[in-house]
Image (tube, rainbow, N blue to C red):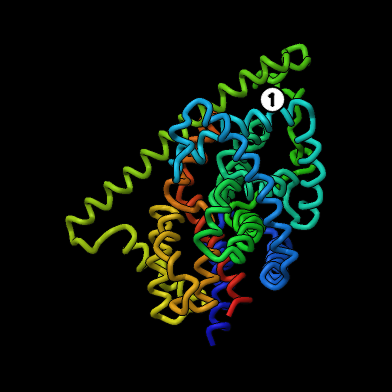
Amino acid sequence: MYLAINIIGLIVFLAIGWLFSKDRKAINWRAVLTMTALNLVMAWFLTSFPIGRTIVKGAAAGFDALVQVSYQGIAFAIPSMVNVKSMDFFVSVLLPILMIVPLFDILTYIGVLPWIIKWIGRGLSFITRQPKFESFFAVEMMFLGNTEALAVSSLQLKRMSAKRDLTLAMMSMSCVTASIIGAYTQMMPGQYILTAIPVNVINALVVTSMLNPVQVSQEEDFIAKIGGSASVADGTVEADGKKEPFFSFLGDSILSAGRLVLIIAANVIAFVALAALVDKLLGLIHPWVSLEHLLGIIMFPFAWLMGLNPSDAFQFAQYMGEKLVTNEFVVMGKVTGKIATAAFSEHYRAVLTVFVTSFANFSTVGMIIGCFKSIVDREKNDLVSKNVPYLLLSGILVSLLSAATVGLFAW
């Protein structure tokens, strides 16, 4: 019975994507069904075969090593904030941008990154029927995180249409950062954490291709390269078409990364504080009333569609609401001591772990808007800002689809 409900839930979540689509007639159903089938096969493979989990874990370890190197630079300047038991969000997530962005800018400068984008993009685009850059960006954000992936894609964002930029903003709600995957696996079942990451990638493409379908012509399906008109405007090349001197280019890249860190931090602080203010105001009505509880009630039907009994579904809905208002670590901290016990069935354990494995929450909206504000022009940034509900819906739908997909194979 519950397996049948889980299957129905997967169909319902796809139907929600169709219902809220900006252009239902433009949805490429062949691509949607192909990517959904691919995700079902991948979820089955990654939950049943150790080799699949080993591949994902190895890739994540490589990116984690990159972030660990960035901590050495941070520790040189502020060792008291790095050599601690638990680093602050600003230090652990934002400050590595100061190294990661220049590194990827250097790879772009020397032509390595455009080459990688070209071939990986072509392969994924062939499989998913999505534009080349959107396909590459889905993999890029799987390990780098939303702000880092957007930052290293700044040249592309400036050259693409505003509607395609909105697609990338919506996709960015469903990422993780390689540097904290290890922390995730210490708190939740690693098998499902590592399964959720690639499944989220494909579902981000599924959801955005339904909510914001974009027809990309062959001429528009380009990969931005240093030397184009956008590069001149951005300062990566001189007006005469020659590349800017390397160290001048690197200095500009580092300064841009610093501005990006400050803008993102300001937006995150403001969004989290405003959410806390709303909780305070709601508490005046009744101590029980809060954003978490209200969202939990709203999310109950969707939790039940995961194939959970009503009691577990209501508890799961509370976790869902709390994760959306705060972040995944809050929920992980609450269940880490008991999720491996008999208090959680295998199915409940799987769907909860997969659902919380993403940055889909209110504060992430602030990070994305802040990132776009520092990269693109006002017209494109305004379009992203006007579609905050779609950003949230995209993140929630991806989490629901991923949890329902993996849940089919865990009982």
| Residue 241 to residue 120: above or below | above
From the top left corner, tell me how far across and down residue 192 is, in percent. 59, 66
The residue sitting at the bottom extreme is 1
Residue with the mark numbered 1: 230
Q: Quadrant of residue 238?
A: top right
- Which quarter of the picture shows residue 109? top right
Nearest the eye: 404 or 13: 404
Left or right, 87 with reference to 291: right
Q: Which of the pair 365/98 is nearer the observer?
A: 98
Question: Total marks drawn?
Answer: 1
Q: Amino acid at mark 1?
A: Ala
Decide if residue 180 is on the left or right side of residue 80. Answer: right
**In the rendered image of this protein, does residue 33 appear above or below residue 152?**
below
Report the quarter where the C terminus lies.
bottom right
Image position of 155 with respect to 386: above or below: above
Residue found 62% across the figure and 36% down from its top: 69
Quarter of the image for the N terminus: give it: bottom right
- Kindly identify the residue that appears in the image at 18 percent across and 61 percent down: 286
Q: Would residue 376 be seen by someone viewing this image from the given angle?
A: no
| Residue 339 position (above or below residue 28) | below
- Tag 1 secondary structure: helix
Q: Residues within 10 Å of mark 1 (few under 14, many from 20)?
A: some
The part of the image, by quadrant, that contains residue 330 is bottom left
The picture places residue 281, in percent across and down from the top left corner, at 22, 51
Q: Residue at x 63, y 48 (%)?
A: 143
Residue 305 seen by the camera? yes
Q: Position of residue 80 (x, y in %)?
A: 43, 33
Q: Residue at x 47, y 70 (%)?
A: 339
Q: Give residue 137's position: percent from left, percent from top.
A: 67, 45
